[in-house]
Amino acid sequence: MNSLKGKKIVLGITGSIAAYKSCLIIRQLIKRGAEVQVVITPAGKEFITPITLSALTSKPVISEFFSQRDGTWHSHVDLGLWADAMLIAPATASTIGKMANGIADNMLITTYLSMKAPVFIAPAMDLDMYAHPSTQRNLSTLQSYGNHIIEPGTGFLASKLEGKGRMEEPENIVSQLEHFFEAQSAPATSSDLSGKKILITAGPTYEKIDPVRFIGNYSSGKMGFALADECANRGAEVTLVCGPVSSAMQLSSPTVKRVDVESAQQMYEACHSQYPCMDAAILCAAVADFAPETVAEHKIKRTGDDMVIRLKPNPDIAASLGAIKSPGQALIGFALETNDEESNALSKLRKKNFDFIVLNSLQDKGAGFQTDTNKISIISAEGKEDFSLKSKKEVAKDIVDKLQHIMAK
Ligand code: CTP
């Protein structure tokens, strides 16, 4: 089946020498039955002419906000609603930086900011520019917004930069889009999670000290969000109980029910009201183990003396759910360890009555808080499985595969 047939693609072209390859992308998209609307930056036009592009797409190329001097203007909002996908190929460091930071000074960026459809970005620049921390940071930011980065090679990992920078070949870019639409339209398989109810916790918790201060941690929530999307994509009814995460954290699946909480106590209550009717829970949140014994009513003032905050233990959500777990229910935990990883994880597995535990070691580069990647081991009564460093989305697939496997038993 040709998954691109009838798909409406906004193709953003920017000022890179690779702009000529856009013609090949257009040809392949059109050959597969897609409709293509080009939006080009002013710099892009230095590399390829709008006449060539409009001849290939049979549509006028959009570049300026105003098409003529008669007051008619192009609506980026309409384009955002029209498209089934936006592809920016080639994407220069400058455009990537503007996209990551919302600098809407041309039609391509305004279109991107109003885009309702998935966005694919194929970077093209020399290796030094690509490897620069600011480009890497901007790409990570765009990835955290749910944008798809298309690059030569296997993954978007700073450690694998060699040979990177050149835009991915047009046929591979088009086949990535094709795979994306294929996966979207794929019918649910028999090994999926439809009909299953899954509770997931994600993010940090904040424990109030006074009206303006709290105790928190660096958890971003990325792993929990990836798990929620993965379970929902496989047909599960997902409830995500989520601590205070950045507003940039968005779910791609519209079906996930999100319950926002702040403190460990609130997370505990939300989980206990949900778990009894769930088939499984994945406890990915970095729950604060302690909270201030009392919360000051007013902002605490500096007195010149030492400041002592007495902490009381928070409830252990995982252990309390493990204690009420009924036969047929699954419970999955996480352990972030800095030393004696395996034995600590094993003792948590038993203590909290988990079916398996996902171990991250802070000794592994690219694993843990705030990163887009993770390196895990899965430990269960049957033993330990090690996985390689992957994007959190890919890691979520491995974890949900394992969950599906134990739920099928
Ligand atoms: N967890 C929880 N409630 C808590 C603390 C932890 O549900 N109050 C869950 C986490 O979501 C994770 C697992 O328990 O799935 C392990 O968390 P971790 O903080 O590593 O375990 P602790 O029992 O707090 O052990 P440690 O002494 O290492 O902090």
Image (cartoon, helix red, strand yellow):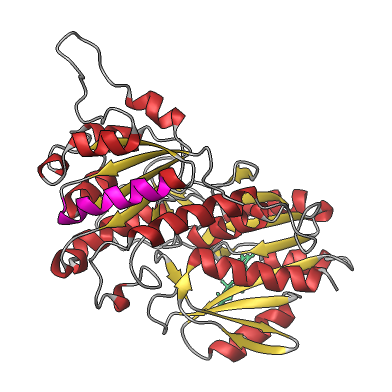
Pick the front one: 220 or 34: 34
The magenta region covers 16-29
Quadrant of the drawing holding the C terminus: bottom right
Residue at the farthest right position: 327
Pick the front one: 396 or 74: 74
Q: Is residue 23 magenta?
A: yes
Residue 354, picture quadrant? bottom right
Residue at the farthest top position: 70
Residue 198, picture quadrant? bottom right
Pick the front one: 319 or 31: 31
Q: Is residue 209 left or right of residue 192?
A: left
Q: Residue at horizontal 18%, vertical 8%?
A: 70
Q: Is residue 177 left or right of residue 276?
A: left
Q: Is residue 247 visible?
A: no
Q: Residue at horizontal 64%, vertical 88%?
A: 384
| Ligand 1 in which quarter | bottom right
Q: Is residue 101 above or below residue 303?
A: above
Q: Is residue 279 visible?
A: yes
Residue 327, x across and y down, in percent: 89, 68
Q: How many marks?
A: 0
Q: Residue at horizontal 19%, vertical 35%?
A: 50
Residue 250, x across and y down, in percent: 49, 46
Residue 401, x across and y down, in percent: 68, 70
Q: Is residue 44 above or below residue 232?
A: above
Q: Is residue 346 left or right of residue 89?
A: right
Residue at the farthest left position: 46
Dominant secondary structure, magenta:
helix
Q: Is residue 153 magenta?
A: no
Residue 302, x across and y down, in percent: 27, 51
